[in-house]
Amino acid sequence: MFSRSKTMTAAAATAAIAMGALVLSGATAASADGWTTYQRTVPFDGYAAVTAFAVDPVTQTAYGIGFSASGPGADAIVSIDAATGATDTFYQLPPTGYVMDVQVDSDQRLLYIVSTSDDFSAGRVTVVDLDTAATVATIVDPSLTDAMTMTIDPQTHDGYVLNGGSDTGSSPIAIIDGTTHTVKGTITDPSLVNSASLTVNPVNHLLYVTNDGDPSHPQANVAVIDTVNRTVVKTITSGVTWPYRVAADPSTGRVYVANQPDYVELPDGSYSTTPSSILEVDGSTNTVTRTIASPILQQATGLAVDAATNTLLITGGGDYLPGQPALVSVDLASGVVDTAGSFPAELSTFDVVVEANSRTVWTLNGVFDGTPSVSILGLTAKPTTTRIAAPDRFSNAVEIAKAAYPTTAPVVYIATGLNYPDALGAGAAAAHEGGPLLLTTPTELPASVTTEIQSLKPDTIVVVGGPNSVSDSVLAQLHDLAQTVTRQGGADRYEASRNIVAGAFDHSTTAFIATGSTFPDALSATSAAASKGAPVVLVNGAASALDAKTLALLQTLGVTDVTITGGPASVSPAIESQLKAVYGSGHVMRLGGADRFDASATINEQFFHTATHAYLATGSTFPDALAGGVLAATKSAPLLVVRGDCVPTPAVGALQAWGVSGVTLIGGTASLSPALGTLHPCS
């Protein structure tokens, strides 16, 4: 929550942050490493700005201070219902004075509105019934001078109102009795200079106040106050440069303090900043235990801790600060700073609240750009990640096979690991017949592959591709490892695909069609096809029609429904029209996307409506996904192809929509970087 002059422009508001005039208090929240699922954004229609907000967890309603588009002042407390998105005027404000903050005491069903006079000399706290919008009390007291912001003790229900001070003057704190709604005392101390925010630690019941002494910050500190004796028991200065926001973890009692960056005004009127840092304070010793920093953490205007997922959420980015994601998360176990799941980058976020019981995140947006809104997001724990990796693609396929078939398998498929065309459709065939897909060089069977085949004890080995792909000498080696060894090849990749399908499938009412020119679409379809007991048939996607042999294969299988994987650039619209003419428009479905990653998510979301586990493989090369698709199929789980350095937004959305709790990365760090271990979302 922050103070704002009634006539403050966006530019002036930005400058005011630099001077410490915008005062924020710690957002109450509650969370192991979490990520958010974006749900929707609701605008504060009819208001030019909404400068602070609070959330009632009982009714899932947010309350904001609304500044009218037609006037200079704050006009009303505006409510937004999370369930319906409906906005309404909850409480009309008086025409004079400045409204600075709003806080909710949900247990007492009360809303506190903090305001000050036009000349910032006399403060007032209005107490409003949350259920009836009736005024319960209007608190006016000499100790309420330049009332700026407030926090509420969740146990005693007492309120602590921070009064503004000059750069050298004190910022006294008025204590409001939560029962009588009267001022019952004050807290003053030399350390309380130009205070910015405050919060009550629900574990140790101490009050933490950030003080910056702006502009040169000579007295920057975090004051720790005993609320019983009303005295400062410690001032924390280590690592404190410009302390701004503060939030407490209701589970561990740790306190998190955001150091605000210094601002430099540029000739065009914009501002450059040094990155923010977050200080972690041990609530038992009140000492700084670590500093958290990251290049993507440029500014922290809002903090909220979710105890359930051990995550700190931070706002202050988006369009307002393009170098920073709109919503940032910190895994408090590891200190890793990352983008907090899916969130529209075009929004400018300013404050955040976590509502623990409903697992809901609220952000206040558009404070400075004239388009105020609230975004509502779900909050879940990130899936745990494991990795299957080996020194090379051949031994990696062996490790994948061990995970899929830990004992024996009736059949093993063998394909070259050096090129993809012959093998693209083999994954679905291998999964259908109940065996893994292993890789070889064209001229020699790797020792690790020989050992794995011996362990699996298959009756049959199917070699995919002609002698140029897998030589006769490798075929001879395989004859020593199984009773039956067959080769499924052809004059080209399309004939090889038809032969693979004909050899593995006697009947299937569904078939997947994929281009044989590139690999991502076919690999994304492997597990989806296996879920339907269907083959993946490779075609010349650039052609104007399917050839007669492919149509004959589909007819022989008894196909009645066809899924085209990939967009028009992969499989031509002419082929789609041809298939619709044969099977009917309602029996031909195209699943594509803006790119291979989007298409992969689209394909898998169509056939997997829920999933507890998922597999990720790089979409840049083929071997990991080729063998990994069989593993995913054996687990009835989706396999998504992703970027090597981050998880694309469509994949993040799919994992969240499925409710995935575990993810297996297929491939080493050269294929999927260490950032994938934290499921780092792409910007």
Image: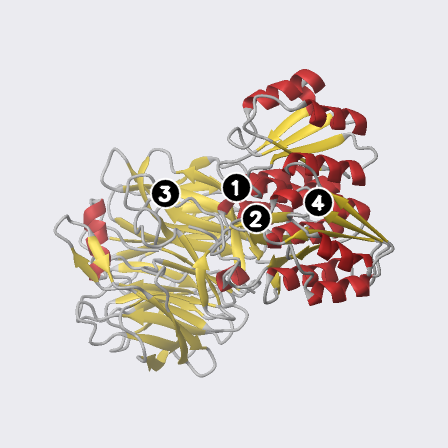
Horizontal side of 577 relative to 282 (left or right) equals: right
Q: Choose the circle earlier in sequence order: 2 or 4.
A: 4
Q: Which residue lies at the image location 32% right of the left edge and 60% below the top edge?
A: 298
What's the amino acid at mark 2?
Val
- For numbered disc 4, what is the local secondary structure? helix
Q: Quadrant of the N terminus?
A: bottom left
Distance between the Cα atoms at labels 1 and 4?
A: 20 Å
Horizontal side of 318 relative to 549 (left or right) equals: left
Tell which of 331 and 390 is nearer to you.
Answer: 390
* Mark closer to the observer (3, 2): 2
Distance between the Cα atoms at labels 1 and 2?
A: 8 Å
Q: Choose the circle earlier in sequence order: 1 or 4.
A: 4
- Of all residues, the one furthest to the top in this rendering is 581
Which residue is under mark 3? 346
Residue 403 place in picture, x, y as percent: 73, 61
Residue 534 seen in the figure:
no
Residue 59 place in picture, x, y as percent: 55, 46
Which residue is under mark 4? 426
* Quarter occupied by residue 33: bottom right
Q: Choose the circle earlier in sequence order: 1 or 2.
A: 1
What's the amino acid at mark 1?
Arg
Q: How crowded is mark 1: few (under 14 residues within 10 Å), some or many (20 or more)?
A: many
Dots 2, 4 in contact, CB < 8 A: no
- Of all residues, the one furthest to the front in this rendering is 473
* Mark closer to the observer (1, 3): 1
Which residue is under mark 1? 596
Residue 652 seen in the figure:
yes
* Quarter occupied by residue 288: bottom left
Q: Choose the circle earlier in sequence order: 3 or 2.
A: 3
Which residue is under mark 2? 641
Q: How crowded is mark 4: few (under 14 residues within 10 Å), some or many (20 or more)?
A: many
* Mark closer to the observer (2, 4): 4
